[in-house]
Amino acid sequence: MSDSEHGRSTKLVEGGRRKDWRGQLVNVPVERASTILFDDVAELSASRPGVGTYRYGLQGTATHWALAEALTELEPGAAGTVLYPSGLAAVTTPLLALLSPGDELLVPDNVYGPTRKFCETILKRMTIVTRYYDPLIGSGIADLIGGKTKAILLESPGSLTMEVQDAPAICAVARERGIVTLLDNTWATPLLFPALAAGVDVAILAATKYVGGHADVMLGSATATEKYYQRIQTATWDLGHALSPDDAWLGSRGLRTMAVRLRQHQESALKVAHWLKARADVGLVLHPALPDCPGHEIWRRDFTGSSGLFSFELKTPGKAARAKFVDSLKLFGIGYSWGGYESLVLPVDPVRSVSKPPASNLVRLHIGLEDADDLIADLDAAFDQAGR
Ligand SMILES: *Cc1c(COP(=O)(O)O)cnc(C)c1O
């Protein structure tokens, strides 16, 4: 176990690597198990489900516990981390664990699309009502809280349009009223925004993105305070979610280099974003570290850096020109997800219920670990194509 006084890069290297779990190896190995054998009936009868206790595959093995412990250590104030087979499951399962029929949930209007769909289908069928709020609402969230409001979801920066939320203000209001807060922290990770220290109760990662880091694993995590951790862990077991140990191991392997990768994503993404901002055929550049981005001042106040994902407005009008621009790129792959070592591009059209996106004709970029100058040359050529 790493010392809580250590820096975050040291914690990334040391986290979860207990000698009991790794033996003489550097990293904790893959332990595959459904059945775990007991010595006798007395040991069987005494066994209780718990993290760190070999009992049944559903409760995991050292491979899972090591990743969960390493993630817990990155969030000062956390009691534990629950692992999931996808980022989406890490959003939906804690909500199922904490909400009951008749409850109301507040969700930012720029929330990740599949999270919105879960609210509109499964939660709705359970008579759990979702009310969307302007992501820039800040402490004004108090006006939306009613007697049935039981949870507030945050996502900062939000999907596609990147608004940065005033999480400390929202969480302060929620805590005063006894309402649980859950933050999707996928863009920043705890390295750029330690969420629990800002007042969040449950910090969620689509670990598929920067924790995995190599576009080859689906993974999620929810790191929670003492008050909520056990409830979420128990509900996750009750629902039968089991993460493959191979995927947990890929998470641990990715995590060790997350800080260095993020530093490079940050440097290259800023270079590309500033280059885009200087172009006449680009409108708003929605990168939290640039003043165009709604909530930029909050990013400056609360975050220690930026990552590789942002959007920009293509001024050349029409979806056809946008498609031509995207299709002309050679180094940017067209595909879902992000956070891997490779650059990606998507044309995006935000869906809103109560607020307006800051711009339209948006293109979302994930800046990977290629040379930034090569990416800029590729973008330059694609602008030429789109303008023809
Ligand atoms: C990708 C993503 C998710 C879902 O993660 P998956 O592992 O793809 O299920 C959740 N939230 C945000 C903000 C994401 O970008």
Image (cartoon, rainbow, N blue to C red):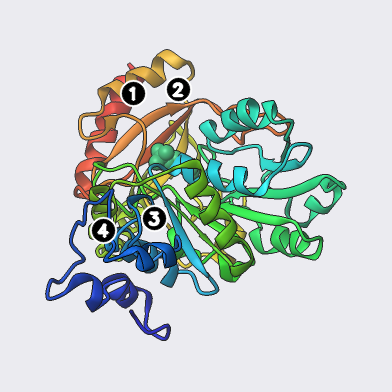
Q: Is residue 79 above or below residue 165?
A: below
Residue at image mark 2: 316
CA gap, disc 4 to disc 2?
65 Å
Asked if ligand 1 lies within 8 A of label 2, the reply is no
Residue 381: x, y in percent?
A: 25, 29
At a point 61% along the width and 36% down the height, the residue shown is: 358
* Residue at the spot of label 1: 325
Quote the CA–CA distance across marks 3 and 2: 53 Å
Looking at the rendered structure, the kind of residue marked 2 is Thr
The residue located at (49%, 19%) in the rendering is 317
* Residues at circles 3 and 2 in contact by the CB criterion of under 8 Å: no
Q: Earlier in the sequence, mark 2 or mark 1?
A: 2
Counting from the top left corner in percent of width and height, residue 300 is at: 55, 64
Q: Which of 296 and 213 lies nearest the eye of the viewer? A: 213
Q: Earlier in the sequence, mark 3 or mark 2?
A: 3
- In 3D space, how far apart are the residues under numbered discs 3 and 4 (Cα atoms)? 14 Å
Determine which residue is flagged by label 4: 37
Contact between labelled residues 1 and 2, with CB atoms less than 8 Å apart: yes
User: x, y percentage for residue 371?
Assistant: 19, 49
The answer to whether 189 is drawn above or below residue 363 in the figure is below
Q: Residues within 10 Å of mark 3 (few under 14, many from 20)?
A: many
Determine whether, in the image, residue 94 is placed left or right of residue 321. right
Q: Secondary structure at mark 3?
A: helix
Q: Earlier in the sequence, mark 3 or mark 4?
A: 4
Q: Which mark, residue 59?
A: 3
Pick the front one: 278 or 224: 224
First in sequence: mark 1 vs mark 4: 4
Tell me the quarter of the image containing the N terminus.
Answer: bottom left
User: Do the CB atoms of the residues marked 3 and 4 lie less than 8 Å apart?
Assistant: no
